[in-house]
Amino acid sequence: MDNNPNRIQNKYTRALVFILLLLGSLVMLFPFFWMISGSLKTIREITSPEIIWWPEEAQWSNYAEVLTMKTNPFGIYFKNSILVAVANTVFTLFTTILAAFAFSRLEFKGRDKLFSILLATMMVPSQMYIITNFITITRMNLYDSLWAQIIPYTASVFYIYLLRQFFNQIPDQIYLAAKVDGCSDWKYLWKMMVPNAKSSLVTIGLFNFIASWNAYLWPLMVTGNINKRVLSIGLQYFASESGTAYHLMMAGATIVVLPLIIIYLLFQKYIIQGIARGGLKG
Amino acid sequence: MVGQNQKKTFFRAMLYLLPALVIIAVFVVYPMFHTLRMSVYEDFNIFSKEGSGFGLSSYIWVLQDPNFHKALANTFIYAIVTVPVSIALSLVIAILLNSGIKGSKFFQTAYFLPYVTNAIAIGLAFRFIFHSEFGIFNKFLGLFGIDAIQWLNDPDWAMFTLCIFGIWSALAFKIVIFLAGLQGIDPQLYQAARIDEAGKWKQFIKITVPQLGPILAYQFVIATIGAFKAYVEVVGLFGDDGPLHSATTMVYYMYDKFYNANRYTIAAASGVIMFLIIMVFTFIQMHMSNRRADQ
């Protein structure tokens, strides 16, 4: 227990630190609590001048109402969000695995130069190229389709960089030995490298899924039809159309956030490691 | 023979790279040049892809537009306020989390949670919290006899509220990075300091800060770049760019010019200006990480 050199020895200081951390964590968690509590209130409770911490009777019907709305069909939004995020993630993992393998194992002419050029593109903020991407997608006749939200985000230099880093750590001798044994590159990649890099791939997949789930500006630009909206967009439209129906807005917001919270609680370790590792590398 | 082999390897590598390269070429590399090209025309037809009025007129227009000045000023205010405050707060929280307190697992889960949340949804929760009439924040202030403040509807308060939301959203990521950095510091350094009977504060100044130096610098640059791209926070909190456009940002300006006003060349020019500003910070970061690699 006393291995930690940063451990505070003084009992009172420790109590003070505990209280500070507790207060801080309440501030961090409060918006989530307030959103969920609000989502279960009646309109009367949510607009009451008193502070009502928790509804007298939880109004689960708020969720049913939001999910079956005609003007803002959250059921369809939810389905679209899942489709786009899953497709994004599957395609991105595929392109990332192949590219990272080529950059890590295959010795071809101009490899390092090509890789540096790709890295250089990371400096350009994505906000700058969505203008042109909108034009490209429109000319491809993909405006107002889920594909428009999927295709531009099916390859990422950053993830290729991260996975290549990991592939590089797998000793070269195994690769050479496998080649002597007549194992093809393709087979080696899927039988050896991919299973070995499982934790990195889970992390990349999670980050990609979360990023896709939370994307806003791009999906907003390429969708017009209600049936092609994803949750972020649908929620934003709903919020601007529903006036003071804050109890329903909070239910909509909870529907958007809840899957993220579940993913976070299930995969916390991968997500934290991913930030710490990817972030520190810069 | 060797030449042929080389060609074969190259061809095979290209097969592996093709899916990623095609997407990156079409949706990342090409748009950089195309946006740049659009920005140097006065007018651009996005269907025929032809521009007219070659020159810097779009840049001049943007740089003289009071709305762009507002967007630029707001973006700078947002960066100058949220970056130092969120870094200071997250450093303090990370140090407290790292001090072997009971329940630190729970605390970590709580402090990291905002990292995964959707800015539109949680912005809506903040909108409700800061609502002038039904919001709990004003009700709470009311207990102390403070009159209701129009956090979201008063142009003078809009940026303040936006910064609070921005700081809250930005903490989680920074705490994770600081915590990883703190755990990477050699414990022997502290043990040595303890033998020398150095106090906690002295240990912090003499060991923690210098050891975290590169991470601290990294956080400043990354956070500043992130702050310059602020957009979804604004929409999440206000639904638009705030009362009387008081919380508009550079990305908001660009989007508005492109999508709502159909001024493509103006949008492209403002995008390039934003890129140049961010570029300065990217170079600072590259310079620093190179220095780190050299050490």
Image (spheres, rainbow, N blue to C red):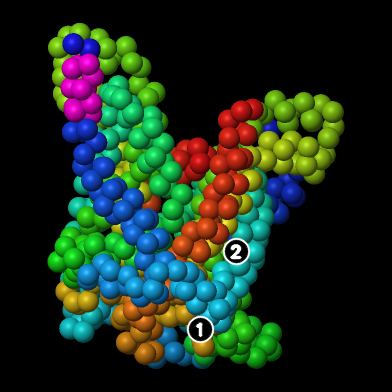
In front here: A187 or A207? A187
Give the percent coordinates (x, y) of residue B151: 57, 83
Kindly identify the amino acid type of the residue bearing the numbered disc 2: Ala
Q: Which residues are magenta?
A: B3-13
Q: Where, quadrant-wise, is the N terminus of chain B in this rendering?
A: top left
Snapshot quadrant of residue A195: top left
Q: Where, quadrant-wise, is the C terminus of chain B in this rendering?
A: top right
- Label 2 sits on residue: B79
Q: Is residue B43 left or right of residue A137?
A: right
- Total marks shown come to 2
Q: Residue drawn at (37%, 82%), measured in percent from left and top? A: B261
Q: Is residue B69 left or right of residue A242?
A: right
Which SS class for mark 1? helix
Binning the other alpha carbons within 10 Å of mark 1 as few (below 14), some (14 to 19) or many (20 upward) gives some
Q: Is residue B170 visible?
A: no
The rendered magenta stretch, by its main secondary structure, is classed as helix
Residue A29's place in the image compared with B239, above or below, is above
- Label 1 sits on residue: B245
Give the percent coordinates (x, y) of residue B180: 55, 39
Kindly identify the amino acid type of the residue bearing the numbered disc 1: His
Which SS class for mark 2? helix
Q: Is residue B6 magenta?
A: yes
For marks 1 and 2 on the same chain, the one whose residue lies earlier in the sequence? 2
Mark sitting on residue B111: none
Q: Is residue A257 magenta?
A: no
Q: Residue drawn at (27%, 16%), measured in percent from left and top? A: A175
Q: Residue drawn at (21%, 42%), measured in percent from left and top? A: B19
Give the percent coordinates (x, y) of residue A11: 73, 45
Snapshot quadrant of residue A63: bottom left
Q: Residue drawn at (63%, 54%), measured in percent from left and top? A: B87
Query: Alpha carbon of mark 1 to alpha carbon of mark 2: how far?
Result: 18 Å
Q: Is residue A217 visible?
A: yes
